[in-house]
Image (cartoon, helix red, strand yellow):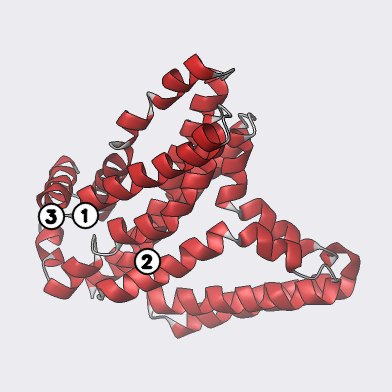
Amino acid sequence: MTAVFKHELRMMFSGLTAYVYGAFSLFFVAIYMMVYNLASAYANFEYALAGASFAFIIMIPILTMRIISEEKKQKTDQLLYSLPISTTQIVIGKFLAVFVTSVIPLCVVVIYPLILQNYGNLYLPTAYGAMFGYIMTAAVLLSIGIFISSITESQAMAAGICFAAMILNYYMVTVAEYATSSAFASLIAILVVEVILALLIRHMTRNDVLAEVIGLIAVIGTAALYIYNSDWFQGLFPNILENISVYERFYQFVDGIFDYTSVVYFISVIVFFLFLTVQSLEKRRYN
C-alpha cells in the first residue's frame, strides 16, 4: 500500500495534475473570500468555504480521471496485480494519494481564519469545523471519482461521468425541492433507481442472472410495499435525495453544527465506494 501511495503521489506531482488542482482550489477559495469577506466586509470563513466547494465539480474529475482508467488502457495495471499486496491495499494507496494531494492546498487556507479574526467576530471552532466538513466532502467525492475511473478505460469518459456525478451531488437538494412529493411519483423514481443499480451490478459482475435476481427482488419488494401502504411513499423520494446529499451534510458544518452522524455518513460512503472499486478491479484481475 505504501509503495502504491508513493508512486501515485510521485506521478501527480511529476505532471500537472496536482498543481492544477491546487491552483483551482486556492483560486476558488480566494474568490469567495473576496466576495464574502472583503466586498461584503463580513468576517465569515464558513460561507467562503461553502461557496468554494462548487469547485469540486471541476477539480474532482481532474484529479481522479486517470488514476485507474489510464492504467487499464495502458495495461500497466497488470504490474500492480503482480505485487505482493491485495487489491484493497492498492485502492487504499491510490485513494490516500489523491486525498493528500487535495489536502495540501489547505495548508495555506488554514491560516485564513486567523487573519479574519483580526477584522471581525470570527468563531474559530465553527470555522475549523467547516474546514473539517470541507475535507470530508472532498474525500467522499474523491472516492466516487476513483470508482468511476475504475469502470472505464477512457480518461475522457471517466471525467465526463465524474463531472455529471459531481453536478448531481451539488444540485441534489435543489432537485429534491422540485421533485414531486406524491406517492406514485416516488414509487416510479425509486423503481428507476433500482433498475439503474441492477444494470450497474451487471456491468461490474458480468453476471446477468445475479443482476436480474437482485433487480427483480428490489422491484417486487418496492411494489409490494406500495400496494400494502402507499402513504409510506408520500414525499419519500425527495427525502431520500436530501438525506444522501453529500453537500447537505457539509452545509451542517458550515452552519456550525458538528453532527457525528454526518461524520459516520462520510466515512460510510467512502468505504462503500472504495469497496465497489476493489470489486471492479478484482473482476478485471481474475478475468
* Residue type, mark 1 in image: Thr
Between marks 2 and 3 in the image, the one whose residue lies nearer the viewer: 3
Confirm or deny contact between disc 2 and disc 1 (CB under 8 A): no
Instruction: Residue under label 1, please give it.
Output: 17
From the viewer's perspective, is 216 left or right of 204?
right
Residue 67 versus residue 192 in the image, above or below:
above
* Residue type, mark 3 in image: Gly
Locate residue 149, reporting x and y percent: 31, 66
From the viewer's perspective, is 186 left or right of 1?
right
Locate residue 197, reporting x and y percent: 54, 73
Instruction: Residue under label 2, please give it.
Output: 148
Question: Which label's residue is closer to the chain start, 2 or 1?
Answer: 1
CA separation in Å, label 3 and label 1: 6 Å
Residue 159 versus residue 105 in the image, above or below:
below
Confirm or deny contact between disc 3 and disc 1 (CB under 8 A): yes
Instruction: Residue under label 3, please give it.
Output: 15
